[in-house]
Amino acid sequence: MAATAKPVMIVGVDDSEQSFFALEWTLDHFLGPSAPNPPFSLIVVHSKPTPTSSMGFAIPGVDIISHVDTDLKNIANRVIDRAKELCLSKSVNDVSLEIVEGDARNVLCDAVERHHAIMLVVGSHGYGAIKRAVLGSVSDYVTHHAHCTVMVVKKPKTKHEDHHH
């Protein structure tokens, strides 16, 4: 790395269409063929939930965590592979991909600190009200807590999605 390191932009991804829409939007607008010498280094961060946090229950004598963890690892690898393919398809090669275990809200804020990122991009999740009340939205959280500009990319609604709210 030269001393003139590019500013870092982080995109948080999970296995949702919203997050991939956000990544694609970022690639198209900031980094893709339209920007032959992109002004940013891109880091794609996937937060892999810890098995216990995604479970919330335990059955005595049954080793359920290892199965869940395998699933979570598979999901994580699939997300990262998909992100990598998307970047390559947009001819963006200057990209790092990280899988960090933990809660997405903390993981993304930590990544911003660690990489001194100037921008964090997240997708906007169409959670129902109940789930949002319990989880708190990741985009709300990082908007308030990340020490950088946060961009929440909303996926335009298609006609048949309107009724789920």
Image (cartoon, rainbow, N blue to C red):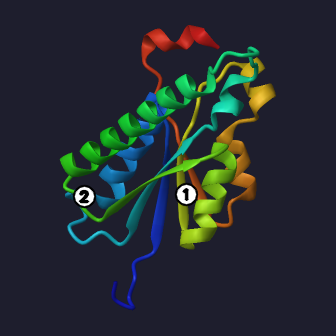
Classed neighbour count for the residue bearing mark 1: other residues with Cα under 10 Å, few (<14), some (14–19), many (≥20): many
Question: Vertically, is 127 above or below 24?
Answer: above
Please state which of residues 136 and 115 is positioned toward the viewer in this rendering. 115
Quadrant of the image occupied by residue 163: top right
Establish if 70 lies above or below 142: above
Q: State the image coordinates of residue 146 (x, y, percent, origin top left).
A: 68, 60
**Looking at the image, residue 87 lies above or below residue 158:** below
Q: Is residue 125 left or right of residue 98?
A: right
Q: Residue furthest bottom?
A: 3
Label at residue 120: 1
Residue 39 falls left or right of residue 115 = left
For the view shown, which residue lies furthest in the front direction?
Answer: 61
Q: How far across and down, in percent of the image, does residue 116 sit?
A: 57, 73
| Relative image position of residue 7 (x, y in whole percent) | 45, 75
- Work out which quarter of the rendered image holds the C terminus and state it: top right
CA separation, marks 1 and 2?
A: 18 Å
Write the residue at 58% across / 31% down: 125
Q: Secondary structure at mark 1?
A: strand
First reached walking from the N terminus: tag 1 or tag 2? 2
Q: Is residue 150 above or below residue 77?
A: below
User: Quadrant location of residue 164?
Assistant: top right
Count neighbours of disc 2 (C-alpha within 10 A) and say few if under 14, some if 14 to 19, many if 20 or more: many
User: What residue do we see at 61% from left, 54% from top?
Assistant: 108
Q: Is residue 155 visible?
A: no
Q: Nearer the viewer, residue 71 or 64?
A: 64
Residue with the mark numbered 2? 92
The answer to whether marks 1 and 2 mark residues whose Cβ atoms lie closer than 8 Å is no
Res. 112 in view: yes
Residue 111 point in image, percent of width and height: 58, 61
Left of 102 or right of it: where is 74? left
Residue shown at the point (37%, 43%) measured from the top left: 80
Q: Amino acid at mark 1?
A: Leu
